[in-house]
Amino acid sequence: MVQMELVSVGMVGGTEDHLMVLREANGNRILVISIGLMEATAIAVALEGVAAPRPMTHDLLVHVIQRLQAEMARVVIHDLRNETFIGQIELKTEKGVLEIDCRPSDAVALAARTGAPIFVTEGVLEAAAIVAGEGEEGSA
């Protein structure tokens, strides 16, 4: 597993596409994932620290996790099937770790709210990552 950092989320200029960009924490690989408008908004709101007057869906889920005395352990993007990334959240509970399947964008929206680390498997990075600086003059 490779730890990643959320670099940005936003709209691709001139299109209706929204992207989430993750960068390898101790490396130079970048993973770009196409996500929906609502998921992009949920992540952006968390990154900007904007508080909605009423809890948004991801805020509600964080509150539910806390009320159940669980904790977001980490987010894992573990597979790529038919050009679709597959993710999960891992929750620490008194009975052990629960793995819950979800869209990577929803998992990252939760991580942005809780500070949980984001991980991607080596296989997913090998299949879909790009290397920062590739093709640039003077890059190694």
Image (cartoon, rainbow, N blue to C red):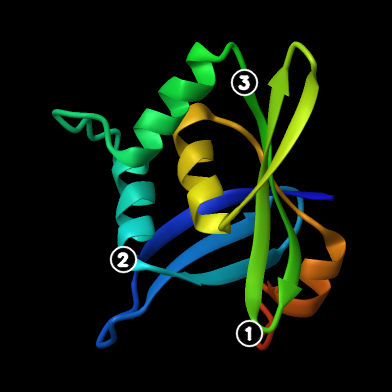
Classify mark 2: helix, strand or loop. Answer: helix
Q: Residue at x 60, y 32 (%)?
A: 116
Are dots 2 and 3 in contact, CB under 8 Å? no
Residue 81's tag is: none
Mark 3 burial class by Cα count in 10 Å: few <14, some 14-19, many 20+: some
Residue in front for this viewpoint, 13 or 92: 92
Question: Compared to 81, does 36 lie above or below?
Answer: above
Disc 2 and disc 3: Cα gap in Å?
27 Å
Q: Residue at x 50, y 28 (%)?
A: 114
Q: Which residue is mark 2?
A: 37
Identity of the amino acid at label 1? Glu
Q: Nearer the viewer, mark 3 or mark 1?
A: 3
Classify mark 3: helix, strand or loop. Answer: strand
Q: State whether residue 139 appears in this view.
A: no
Across and down, in percent, residue 29 comes to 71, 66
Residue in front for this viewpoint, 18 or 131: 18
Does residue 98 appear left or right of residue 38 in this picture? right
Mark 1 burial class by Cα count in 10 Å: few <14, some 14-19, many 20+: few
Q: Which residue is mark 3?
A: 71
Q: Which residue is mark 1?
A: 136
Does residue 11 appear left or right of residue 21 in this picture? left
Question: Compared to 119, does 99 lie above or below?
Answer: above
Identity of the amino acid at label 3? Glu
